Amino acid sequence: MARPIKPRRILFNPNIVYFKPRAVPLSMLEEVNLSVDELEALRLCDFKNLEQIKAAKKMKISQSTLQRILSLARKKVAEALIQGKAISINKK
């Protein structure tokens, strides 16, 4: 049995939850799903320029967990930008 996920502290509630390439019909696009905790990790580390240790403390998770979340989020965003996919932010 897998260990339950600890609750993560999310201080940002996005108003916009979908991004897609311009002039491409939605029916023709593949999607990349970005979770709210992945978006929060990107916001803290890349937008607010916090060090990973400080960002992890704000989210109430370990630095290694933040690193895993951040790596996955960056990979998903890069995939969407390079392959022309839509990004959907999943609110929990």
Image (tube, rainbow, N blue to C red):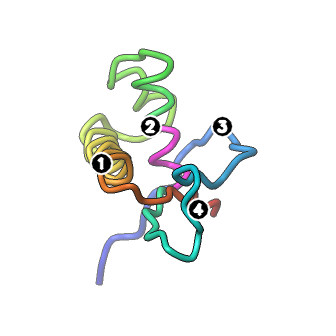
The disc, 4 or 1, on the residue closer to the chain's N-terminal end is 1
Crowding at dot 4, Cα within 10 Å, few <14 / some 14-19 / many 20+, comes out as some
Please identify the dominant SS of the magenta region.
helix
Q: Are marks 4 and 2 in contact (CB under 8 Å)?
A: no
**Residue pointed to by mark 1:** 82
| Element assignment for label 2 | helix
What's the amino acid at mark 4?
Asn
Give the label, 4 or 2, closer to the camera.
Answer: 4
Q: Are marks 4 and 1 in contact (CB under 8 Å)?
A: no
Q: Which mark is residue 12?
A: 3
Quarter of the view holding residue 78: top left
**Residue pointed to by mark 4:** 90
Q: Is residue 51 left or right of residue 30?
A: left
Residue 86 part of the magenta segment: no
Q: Position of residue 22 (x, y in %)?
A: 57, 49
Q: CA distance from mark 3 to mark 1?
A: 26 Å
Q: Quadrant of the N terminus?
A: bottom left
Specify start and end residues of the magenta stretch as a single range.
35-40
Q: Are marks 1 and 2 in contact (CB under 8 Å)?
A: no
Q: CA distance from mark 1 to mark 2?
A: 21 Å
What's the amino acid at mark 1?
Ile
The disc, 3 or 1, on the residue closer to the chain's N-terminal end is 3
Give the label, 3 or 4, closer to the camera.
Answer: 4
Residue 38 part of the magenta segment: yes
Residue 44 position (above or below residue 35)? above
Say which of 75 and 43 sits in front. 75
Q: Residue at x 47, y 63 (%)?
A: 33
Q: CA distance from mark 3 to mark 4?
A: 13 Å
What's the amino acid at mark 2?
Ala
**Residue pointed to by mark 2:** 41
